[in-house]
Image (cartoon, rainbow, N blue to C red):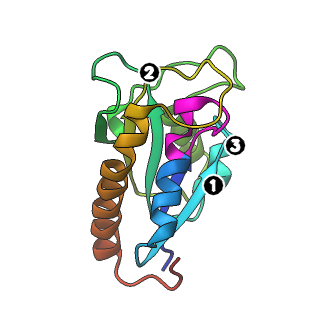
Amino acid sequence: MAPVLVLCLGNDMRGDDGVGWAVAAALDADPPPGVEVRRSAQAGFYLLDELVGAGEAVVVDAIKTGRYPPGTVVEFAIEALAAAPGPSPHAVGLPTVLDLGRRSGLDLPARIDVVAIEIEDTGQVVEGLGLRARQAVPAAAAAVRRLAAAGVARRGTPEVAG
């Protein structure tokens, strides 16, 4: 049985958009059992390659909704995201990609949880997280650990860990 996939998204050269990779680093420091942590700067259809074959997944990313103060950790099931059309077929959101992948018969996770950190800005090309995003990383990593442990318990003991 495959490990629970933790897919940490972002770009560590775009300021707070690197929160997913910072959470990955926190998880790598003390790897959760039965979990595979991956980093990706990809988006859209490219994420299918990362998700195929995973029984369950936790996606970690930055969000900018304006509904929460920057640095707030938000958890939700992927189904809570609306499938908004992208500006082109090459720029579509994860819900649309998952729907198309499932309709195409791809072996995608049966369950995907999202752990996101509300951020202030991703428009700058700058290394490093702002203070609020940096302070939220431990709480986000703890949320990922809890969700991944629940996934491991649901799936049984995976063959590969790390």
Q: Amino acid at mark 1?
A: Glu
Q: Amino acid at mark 3?
A: Tyr
Q: State how far apart marks 3 and 1 are (Cα).
A: 7 Å
How many marks can you see? 3
Disc 3 crowd, CA 10 A, few/some/many (<14, 14-19, 20+): some
| Residue drawn 56% across the image and 49% down it | 21
Query: Which residue is under mark 1?
Result: 50
Contact between labelled residues 1 and 2, with CB atoms less than 8 Å apart: no
Query: Which residue is under mark 2?
Result: 120
Counting residues from the N terminus, which is met first, the one under dot 2 or under dot 1?
1
Asked whether residue 62 appears in the rendered view, the answer is yes
Contact between labelled residues 1 and 3, with CB atoms less than 8 Å apart: yes
Q: Position of residue 3 (x, y in %)?
A: 48, 73
Circle number at residue 35: none
Asked whether residue 55 appears in the rendered view, the answer is no
Q: State how far apart marks 2 and 1 are (Cα).
A: 27 Å
Disc 2 crowd, CA 10 A, few/some/many (<14, 14-19, 20+): many
| Residue drawn 29% across the image and 33% down it | 72
Tag nearer the camera, 2 or 1: 2
Q: Position of residue 87 (x, y in %)?
A: 64, 13
Counting residues from the N terminus, which is met first, the one under dot 2 or under dot 3?
3
Local secondary structure at mark 2: loop
Q: State how far apart marks 2 and 3 are (Cα).
A: 26 Å
Query: Which residue is under mark 3?
Result: 46
Segment colored magenta: 9-20
| Residue drawn 43% across the image and 41% down it | 134
Instruction: Indicate whether residue 10 is drawn in magenta.
Output: yes
The residue lying toward the viewer, choosing from 96 and 161, is 161
Left or right of 62: which side holds 41?
Answer: right
Local secondary structure at mark 3: helix
Local secondary structure at mark 1: helix
